[in-house]
RNA sequence: GGCGCUAUCGUCUAGGGGUUAGGACGUGAGAUUCUCAAUCUUAAAACCCGGGUUCGAUUCCCGGUAGCGCUACCA
């Protein structure tokens, strides 16, 4: 944190500056997280959200809203931004065009910038020529020497013109918290355009067009008093172009921190093509925000010692250190995210996991639409408490919440015929001792007293074999059929669940019986019903 | 093409002029359990290549290679 200390006089101010052109991606989310961590770990630190929507064609308001929601879900909040305002607003670039124009005029008046009247065609042929001669394809400065009065006259006459910044004649250097000192020769920068020429319908007062990104970021960062620019490393090559703007403005250059790219398993830049990489998709699949935050922090950062991996957001705020961030790109590993998610799923308060799991079951059609509602009728409360036990039983089996309904198939999708036909069960069902076990077991279950309970669901019987009673039955089968161990348990398990593997009987049997007593969209079959159905297929 | 950035187990990483190169995910094995999941134990697994500097380089320097980024009146 030493790098933050020296700016103690003025508090740390960082910003996250996304373009609302799509869903929030893991790469951007990590950038947002690192910014947030730096702001929160520094006394008086301020986290600014700035929406870079100058690309009118691709920017959409709904993406901005989505973005903020995704960030909030992760626990990342802002002190200043379009929603909360602040003294350095407005925070949407589309609302700041007048500011950019003013500064451009100032730069022009001071001779730091000049008007360029070159046509697109001319520029393009310059570029081709430069490429052919293997030179850097930068602007050759054709309009640099036009006298200001002459330029002003041509502009007033309505001749289309762009504004270019005069690049200084010295190497451009800046400090990067993750990469150290970075230096570029000025020749590679060139006199870049900072304000486009006016396009029909996009004209600003004074006949200028929409300003260029590399210029507006600097104006914004200067005006918003940003002390640390933390962003993706796709901006390192842009940085010298921006540093030149700071110099022209006579403003101090902030600290930079360029975060490495997140790659997919094929070592390509992570994109939609690589499946679910948007923050929304992680939320939808039932990844906990604390797992995602923890994982993202570990991508490119490790604490001193490098052995600790589990960090809450609060712990990250305490431990995180920008200068320990690695400059090398990292491959996104879904398995490790899942590992963290499994960890946090076990840690999480049961009620929370149940609430989060519920929609998946409603969607699967296993639970009624209103099951999530707070208004708890008596039945609803019963369903909920049963469901809570189901979730608790199944959570150790999943990486993420959306896998839960599939794991719950043993409750809702019992199918004896399919179980008997399943090749996975062939060995168990084909064992010599199987028949004896099954016959004895069927008889025992049938002999159980049936307790009719029509209070919950008229016309249904609730047998209510307890876990203890079930254990006794198994012991009786063991004694009478003379079979023990796997040969005893596997066939019985197959009858009960359709599979020879699954949760402990102690927990499973009561859930089966209690579930059967409930009125659900997909009826859970009781122990006795399962026995009847199974014996019908395999007598 | 030019410029820049990067390079430790399959993956995320720690470390650093002399180390048995550490941890984690994943994988294999074992324990536990009727079984699966969970849990515990355990094993295999890495310093990109070539030159320097040095008594000694994985570590420092240079070059190569590879990957990525930027090369716009995109952001």
Image (cartoon, rainbow, N blue to C red):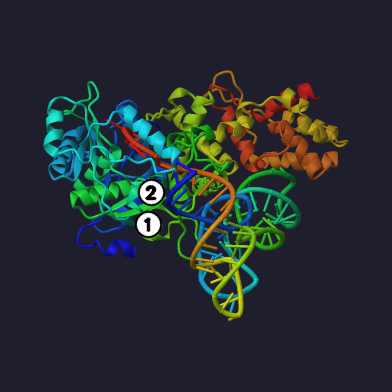
For disc 2, the neighbor class at 10 Å (few under 14, some 14 to 19, many from 20) is some
> What residue occupies the far top of the structure in this picture?
A459
Q: Which residue is mark 2?
A: A236
Q: Secondary structure at mark 1?
A: strand
Number of numbered labels in the structure image: 2
N-term-proximal mark, 1 vs 2: 1
Q: Secondary structure at mark 2?
A: loop
Residue A181 left/right relative to A165: right
Q: Chain of mark 1?
A: A
Q: Quick one: A212 or A477, which is closer to the camera?
A: A212
The image quarter containing residue A355 is top left
Q: Quick one: A485 or A160, which is closer to the camera?
A: A160
Q: Quick one: A521 or A314, which is closer to the camera?
A: A314
- Asked if marks 1 and 2 touch (Cβ < 8 Å), the reply is yes
Q: Chain of mark 2?
A: A
- Which residue is depicted at the point 29% across and 38% down? A213
If the image is split into quadrants, where does the C terminus of chain A sit? top right
Q: Which residue is mark 1?
A: A182
- Residue A197 in the image: x percent, y percent? 24, 29
For disc 1, the neighbor class at 10 Å (few under 14, some 14 to 19, many from 20) is few
């Amino acid at each position: 944190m030493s790098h933050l200390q020296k700016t103690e006089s003025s508090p740390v101010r960082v910003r996250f500056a996304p373009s609302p052109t799509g869903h929030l991606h893991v790469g951007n989310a990590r950038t947002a997280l690192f910014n947030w961590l730096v702001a929160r770990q520094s006394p008086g630190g301020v986290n600014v959200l700035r929406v870079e929507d100058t690309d009118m064609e691709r920017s959409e308001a709904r993406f901005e809203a989505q973005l903020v929601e995704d960030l909030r879900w992760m626990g990342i909040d802002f002190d200043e931004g379009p929603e909360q305002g602040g003294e350095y607003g407005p925070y949407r670039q589309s609302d700041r065009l007048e500011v950019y124009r003013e500064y451009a005029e100032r730069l022009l008046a001071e001779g730091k910038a000049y008007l360029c009247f070159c046509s697109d065609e001319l520029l393009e042929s310059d570029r081709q020529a430069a490429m052919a001669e293997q030179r850097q394809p930068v602007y050759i400065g054709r309009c640099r020497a036009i006298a200001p009065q002459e330029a002003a006259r041509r502009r007033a006459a309505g001749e289309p013109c762009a504004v270019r910044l005069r690049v200084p004649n010295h190497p451009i250097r800046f400090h990067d918290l993750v990469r150290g000192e970075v230096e570029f020769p000025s020749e590679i920068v060139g006199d870049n355009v900072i304000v486009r020429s006016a396009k029909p319908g996009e004209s600003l007062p004074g006949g200028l067009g929409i300003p260029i990104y590399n210029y507006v970021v600097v104006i914004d960062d200067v005006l918003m008093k940003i002390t640390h620019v933390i962003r993706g490393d796709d901006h390192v090559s842009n940085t010298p172009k921006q540093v030149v703007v700071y110099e022209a403005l006579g403003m101090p250059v902030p600290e930079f921190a360029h975060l490495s790219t997140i790659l997919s398993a094929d070592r390509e830049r992570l994109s939609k093509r690589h499946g679910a990489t948007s923050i929304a998709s992680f939320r939808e699949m039932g990844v906990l925000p604390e797992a995602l935050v923890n994982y993202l922090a570990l991508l490119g950062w490790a604490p001193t010692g490098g052995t600790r991996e589990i960090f809450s957001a609060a712990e990250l705020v305490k431990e995180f250190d920008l200068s320990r961030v690695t400059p090398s790109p990292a491959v996104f590993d879904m398995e490790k995210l899942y590992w963290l998610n499994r960890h946090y799923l076990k840690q999480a308060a049961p009620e929370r996991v149940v609430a989060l799991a519920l929609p998946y079951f409603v969607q699967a059609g296993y639970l009624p639409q209103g099951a999530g509602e707070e208004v708890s009728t008596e039945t609803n409360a019963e369903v909920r408490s049963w469901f809570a036990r189901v979730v608790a039983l199944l959570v150790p089996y999943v990486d993420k919440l959306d896998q839960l309904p599939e794991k719950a198939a043993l409750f809702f999708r019992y199918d004896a015929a399919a179980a008997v036909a399943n090749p996975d069960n062939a060995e168990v069902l084909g064992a010599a001792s199987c028949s004896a076990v099954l016959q004895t077991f069927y008889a025992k279950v049938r002999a159980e007293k049936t307790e009719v309970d029509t209070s919950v669901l008229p016309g249904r019987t609730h047998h209510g074999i307890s876990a203890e009673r079930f254990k006794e039955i198994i012991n009786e089968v063991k004694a009478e059929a003379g079979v023990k161990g796997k040969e005893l348990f596997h066939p019985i398990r197959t009858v009960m669940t359709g599979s020879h593997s699954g949760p402990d009987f102690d927990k499973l049997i009561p859930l089966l019986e209690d579930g059967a007593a409930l009125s659900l969209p997909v009826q859970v079959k009781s122990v006795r019903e399962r026995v009847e159905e199974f014996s019908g297929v395999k007598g």
